[in-house]
C-alpha cells in the first residue's frame, strides 16, 4: 500500500490544522532568514540555523541539518532560495528516517505479540492518561480487545481518570486501592488480559520523577512481575512528552531514558503550541522512534507519527 493510502485526507487535514501554529512560526522565521537573498549562501545558512534553534528543533539537531544543507549546496554548486524549502523538507525527512529504524505501524496492522503489552511512562501533566485512553480507542476501533491497568497508584486522581477513559472507550480497567503496589496491579492486568484473550494491554505508571533510582526500581519491578505472565513483556515502553514545553521535554526524555529502557515516544499537545520543531529534535537526539503525536482533544486526534507527512506539514514546501 502506498504512503497516501495509509495517510487519509482526514488525517492530513488534522495534522495540518494541529501544526498550524508551529508552521506559521517556522515559516515566519525562515522567511526572515532568506529575505533579500536569491542564493543560499553562508548568511542564509546562519540565519536558517538561528530560525531552527528558536523553533525548538534544538542546537545539535539544527547543526546536523545545516551540515546536510551545506553538503547539498557544495554538491549542487548553485542553489536558489526558492529551492531551499523543498530541500529542507527532504533533508529533515531523511535525517528522521536515518535515526529511526522502526517502521510506521498503524493501529490496524498485525500486532507483534498477543497480548501486546505497552507500559506508559512520563511525568504528571504531559497527557499520559489521556494518551492511554486515546490509544485504547484507536486499538478498539481497529477491532482489538484492549485491557487497561491503573498502576499509577500514587495519585487517586490518576486511577479515577483512567477509569473515566475506560468507560468512555468501553474497555475494562484493572485497578486496586490507592497506595497499592503498582507491580501487583500490572500483574493482575496482564493475567486478566491473558485469561480473556485480549490483544492489547496498556499499563499506566506513576508520573513522578521523584528520584531516578526509585523510579528505575519501580519500573523494573513492574516489568519483572509482568514477565511472570508474559515472558517478553512489556513489548513497548512508551514515554509521553508534552510538546508545548519545548526544551523541557528534552530534559524529561533525558531523565526517563536514564531510568528505564524507553522504546518509543508519544509527543502530545502539539495543536496548542508553536514548538512543533521539538519533535524533530527529540527524535534525532534520542534515536528513539516517535510513534504517536497528539493534535487535539478528540479521541481521533492521536495519530501514528508519519515522518514525511509531519515534515511536509511543519515546514514550508
Image (cartoon, rainbow, N blue to C red):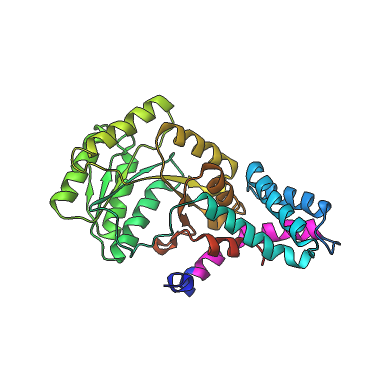
How many numbered tags mark residues here?
0
Q: Is residue 246 above or below residue 315?
A: above
Asked whether residue 18 appears in the rendered view, the answer is: no
Residue 17, percent from left and from top: 55, 66
What x and y, as percent, mark residue 4? 48, 73
Residue 248 drawn in magenta: no
Q: Position of residue 105 (x, y in %)?
A: 39, 60
Residue drawn where x is 38% and y is 30% of the image: 215
Residue at the outermost left position: 195
Q: Is residue 163 left or right of residue 84?
A: left
Quadrant holding the C terminus: bottom right
Magenta segment: 12-34
Q: Can you tell which quarter of the image residue 18 is in?
A: bottom right
Mark yes or no: residue 162 visible.
yes
Residue 142: name its quadrant: bottom left
Residue closest to the far right: 36
Residue at image location 27% in from the left, 31% down from the top: 179
Q: Is residue 43 left or right of residue 252?
A: right
Q: Which residue is drawn at 18% across and 41% down?
A: 229
Please report the residue visible at 47 percent of the width from the left and 50 percent of the height from the top: 289
Q: Which of 280 and 19 is in front in this view?
A: 280
Asked if residue 173 lies left or right of residue 36, the reply is: left
Depth order, front residue of 65/202: 65
Image: 241 above or below 77 = above
| Horizontal arrangement in the rendering, residue 115 relative to residue 210 (left or right) | left
Asked which quadrant contains residue 75, the reply is: bottom right
Give the percent coordinates (x, y) of residue 276. Answer: 58, 54
Q: Looking at the figure, which quarter contains the N terminus?
A: bottom left
Dominant secondary-structure state across the stretch colored magenta: helix
Amino acid at each position: 500500500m502506498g504512503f497516501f493510502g495509509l495517510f487519509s485526507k482526514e488525517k492530513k487535514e488534522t495534522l495540518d490544522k494541529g501544526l498550524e501554529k508551529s508552521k506559521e512560526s517556522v515559516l515566519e522565521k525562515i522567511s526572515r532568514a532568506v529575505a533579500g537573498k536569491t542564493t543560499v549562501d553562508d548568511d542564509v545558512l546562519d540565519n536558517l540555523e538561528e530560525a531552527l534553534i528558536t523553533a525548538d528543533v534544538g542546537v545539535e539537531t539544527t547543526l546536523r541539518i545545516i551540515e546536510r544543507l551545506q553538503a547539498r549546496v557544495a554538491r549542487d554548486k548553485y542553489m536558489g532560495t526558492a529551492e531551499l524549502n523543498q530541500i529542507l523538507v527532504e533533508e529533515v525527512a531523511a535525517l528522521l528516517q536515518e535515526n529511526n529504524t522502526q517502521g510506521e505501524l498503524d493501529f490496524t496492522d498485525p500486532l507483534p505479540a498477543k497480548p501486546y503489552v505497552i507500559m506508559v511512562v512520563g511525568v504528571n501533566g504531559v497527557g499520559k492518561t489521556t494518551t492511554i485512553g486515546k490509544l485504547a480507542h484507536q486499538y478498539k476501533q481497529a477491532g482489538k480487545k484492549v485491557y487497561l491497568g491503573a498502576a499509577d497508584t500514587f495519585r487517586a486522581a490518576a486511577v479515577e481518570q483512567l477509569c473515566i477513559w475506560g468507560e468512555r472507550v468501553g474497555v475494562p480497567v484493572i485497578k486496586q486501592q490507592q497506595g497499592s503496589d503498582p507491580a501487583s496491579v500490572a500483574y493482575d492486568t496482564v493475567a486478566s488480559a491473558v485469561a480473556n484473550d485480549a490483544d492489547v494491554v496498556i499499563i499506566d505508571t506513576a508520573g513522578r520523577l521523584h528520584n531516578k533510582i526509585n523510579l528505575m526500581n519501580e519500573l523494573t519491578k513492574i516489568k519483572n512481575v509482568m514477565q511472570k505472565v508474559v515472558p517478553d513483556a512489556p513489548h513497548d515502553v512508551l514515554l509521553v512528552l508534552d510538546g508545548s514545553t519545548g526544551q523541557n521535554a528534552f530534559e524529561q526524555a533525558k531523565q526517563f531514558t536514564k531510568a528505564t529502557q524507553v522504546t518509543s515516544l508519544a509527543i502530545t499537545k502539539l495543536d496548542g503550541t508553536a514548538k512543533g520543531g521539538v519533535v524533530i529534535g527529540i527524535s534525532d537526539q534520542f534515536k528513539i522512534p516517535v510513534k504517536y503525536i497528539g493534535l487535539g482533544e478528540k479521541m481521533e486526534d492521536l495519530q501514528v507519527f508519519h515522518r514525511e507527512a509531519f515534515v511536509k506539514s511543519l515546514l514550508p514546501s
